[in-house]
């Protein structure tokens, strides 16, 4: 069953009430050391920010969660999920868009700047997951890959709790006819996640609702945070907002989860 959380913002990270029993966080852009358009908690080594500042920001995330190690994949908008079973699986960069682990004290996470971050936990069976679901990953099956991988590690769909974090929300996610046709030709049910703007007559896509529907169809309990990365400029980085403002680059926030 999908729910909506009205959890209030914190300075560094936003939590999901569904995952209160486990260390996790949807981190904001606040609490770091980066400057300018990257201020302040930019976690993206793929940005043009100074690498030493990004590494310091990542260290702050690790300390905030209380992890021994933080693992982030090299994201490629795919449906690839990696399972971290031992230190031998921690070779970086792991190329893909989701991670799953049973290893305690190791934080897994993803980066985003409008795409949908998803954190999952089955505390009863001791397995967690994190996925980066942009429209390509979401429609390409990254959510299903993560849930399948969690079950392969001993998870139970009935026990998995999934939190959908801050992403670009429908009012600010304008897309073209080709985008609409492409998604709806692959997923007939996807028409319910599009609306035409009354004035512009352009399509708007509800990415978080599409992801919530995918999670529910996987048999897990899902909760959606209402925050919009595009409109909440003081809280989140946004790729689309920076493009509209003709900025040369953009920062990335992170979403992380860990077995205690």
Image (cartoon, rainbow, N blue to C red):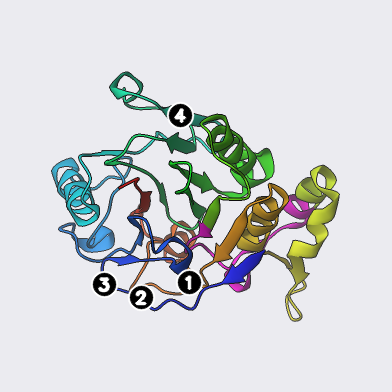
- Relative to 25, is 156 above or below? above
Q: Does the magenta stretch include residue 176?
A: yes
* Marker disc for residue 81: none
Q: Residue at x 37, y 59 (%)?
A: 247
Residue on which the image places disc 4: 83
Q: How far apart are the two marked residues, 1 and 2, measured between alpha carbons?
A: 9 Å
Q: How far apart are the two marked residues, 3 and 2, measured between alpha carbons?
A: 7 Å
- Secondary element at tag 3: loop
Residue 37 rendering spot, x and y as whole percentages: 28, 61
The residue mark sitting in front, 1 or 4, is 4
Neighbor class of circle 3 (other Cα within 10 Å; few <14, some 14-19, many 20+) is few
Q: Is residue 160 left or right of residue 58?
A: right
- Relative to 250, is 137 above or below? above
Residue on which the image places disc 2: 9
Q: Are marks 4 and 2 in contact (CB under 8 Å)?
A: no
The residue mark sitting in front, 4 or 2, is 4
Q: Earlier in the sequence, mark 4 or mark 2?
A: 2
């Amino acid at each position: 069953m999908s729910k909506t959380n009205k959890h209030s913002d914190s300075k560094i990270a936003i939590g999901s009430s569904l995952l209160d029993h486990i260390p996790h966080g949807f981190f904001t852009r606040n609490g770091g050391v980066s400057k300018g358009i990257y201020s302040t908690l930019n976690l993206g080594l793929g940005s043009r920010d100074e690498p030493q500042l990004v590494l310091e920001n990542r260290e702050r995330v690790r300390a905030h969660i209380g992890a021994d190690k933080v693992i982030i994949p090299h994201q490629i908008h795919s449906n690839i999920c990696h399972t971290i079973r031992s230190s031998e699986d921690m070779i970086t960069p792991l190329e893909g868009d989701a991670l799953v682990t049973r290893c305690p004290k190791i934080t897994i996470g993803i980066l985003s700047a409008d795409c949908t971050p998803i954190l999952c936990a089955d505390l009863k069976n001791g397995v967690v997951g994190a996925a980066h679901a942009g429209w390509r990953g979401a429609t390409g099956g990254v959510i299903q890959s993560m849930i399948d991988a969690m079950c392969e590690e001993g998870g139970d769909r009935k026990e998995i709790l999934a939190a959908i974090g801050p992403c670009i929300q429908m009012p600010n996610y304008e897309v073209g006819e080709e985008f609409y046709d492409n998604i709806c030709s692959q997923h007939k049910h996807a028409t319910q996640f599009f609306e035409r703007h009354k004035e512009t007559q352009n399509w708007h896509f509800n990415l978080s609702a599409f992801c919530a529907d995918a999670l529910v169809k996987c048999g897990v309990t899902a909760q959606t945070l209402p925050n919009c990365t595009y409109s909440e400029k003081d809280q989140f980085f946004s790729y689309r907002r920076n493009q509209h403002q003709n900025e040369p680059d953009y920062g990335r926030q992170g979403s992380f989860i860990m077995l205690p």
